[in-house]
Image: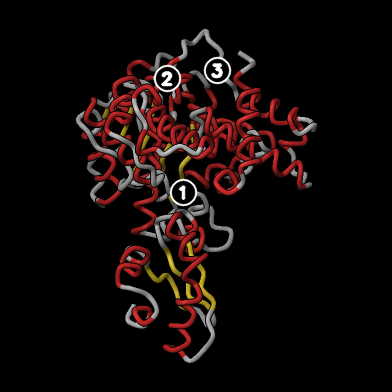
Amino acid sequence: MDLLSAELTSTAISTWFDDCTAVELLENELILYTPSEFKKNIIESRLTDNIKKALRELLSSDMEVRLLCGDELDRYRAKPGDEKAASPCDEYTFERFVVGSSNKFAHAAAMNVATSEERKYNPLFIYGDSGLGKTHLLHAIRHEVLTRHPNYNVVLVKGEEFTNELITAIQLGKNVEFREKYRLADMFLMDDVQFIAGKASTQEEFFHTFNTLFESNRQIVFTSDRPPEEMKKLEDRLNSRFMSGLIADIQPPDYETRMAIIRNKAQQLHLKLTDEASNYIATNLTSNVRQIEGAVKKTMAYCEIMDQDSSSLTAADMAKIIAELFKKQNEYTPTPGDIINETAKYFSISSEEIKSQRRTRNTAQARQISMYLIRTLTTLSLNDIGEFYESRDHSTVHASIRKVEEEIKNNREFAQTIRDITANINSRN
């Protein structure tokens, strides 16, 4: 930083490098990490030459500079072929989880199992309605454990995936490989465990997996949309094991927590919202954290597309921006299929081409726009969106969305294209 001070002001250094850390110095490359994608883009576009000059003076050698952001750090640290750190969701960390009275106990329990070696709460069972943060806590546990213990074998799976993998293992005669994957885990995390209820073979395999891990003092964590006693098709022997650990519920956030979530999400997106705008969201969206965060993202997209200053938004503006979030269930809400179909129609291609691996300029742009619109008009996660495009991973989806967002800012004609497609989608109502 001393060498950089010859090129940059102290304010610039503090602004862009305050949370930037060195990951590794290779023979001809310096690897840096910053948690902010915004700062990463600024450093790469404006400040890389300054860093290279400072390195040249310090090391008497020309060095390249590589910036990592988000889950790129986990992928960089992962060994080749190592799936443990290949795809943690950087959105889902303890630092980004907003704690309030409705989730304080579940958060504390999750933090304990992620940081303690005592296994006091084993298994940990977290339940609550959809969109309240259960998956966030599960990924936060994984992220924290791998940060502390990079070589740990942390297995995170959805209940449905566990069942599908078992079916495939049975079909291919790979039961041994399937069992080794889960029974050799240092930590086992299952999201939506309620999915295995009523599936005899899955419950049988799961029962023995649970016993193996528990008897080996390996931490086990489950999430579910209901408590164990309400899982009617769950075998008694599994129910008793779930009940033997710590059970923590998550309730809908109160007003103060909702406001904190809105401000936290707006800060992440570098979006300035008025108190009036934030209050409108917090007052009208009361039961679903994912929906609240979706409203903030929708507001950012609206301001970018319409070239409107977010710091001047009123309650009336917000009512217009997030109106579709209040639609009744029997009213039209665009599905990912609707969005893909309308985007394909606009570009005169087929929906199958958008979802395929084709890389022609027209198809690639249509694909990126459709991903952006699904993210904007629905509350689907990056991973969920990727499933509509031949199982692309969340990092690919994220990169596509960011590209569209940048193009909207710099290209009025492109922004008009987004508005036209959005209008076509909404006209299906």
Per the image, label 1 sits on a secondary structure element best described as: loop
Vertical arrangement, residue 86 with respect to residue 340, above or below: below
What's the distance in space between the residues labelled 2 and 3, CA to CA?
34 Å
Q: Is residue 156 left or right of residue 412?
A: left
What's the distance in space between the residues labelled 3 and 1, CA to CA?
30 Å
Quadrant in the rendering for residue 212: top left
Per the image, label 2 sits on a secondary structure element best described as: loop
Q: Residue at x 34, y 52 (%)?
A: 144
Q: Which residue is mark 2?
A: 234
State the quadrant of the C terminus: top right
Q: Residue at x 40, y 25 (%)?
A: 317
Choose mark 1 or mark 2, whichever is in front: 1
Q: Identify the amino acid type marked 3.
A: Thr
- The residue sitting at the bottom extreme is 60
Per the image, label 3 sits on a secondary structure element best described as: loop
Q: Give the x, y percent position of residue 100.
A: 22, 33
Q: Identify the amino acid type marked 2.
A: Leu
Q: Identify the amino acid type marked 1.
A: Pro
Q: Is residue 332 visible?
A: yes
Q: Give the x, y percent position of residue 245.
A: 27, 33
Label drawn at residue 333: 3
Q: Which residue is mark 1?
A: 88
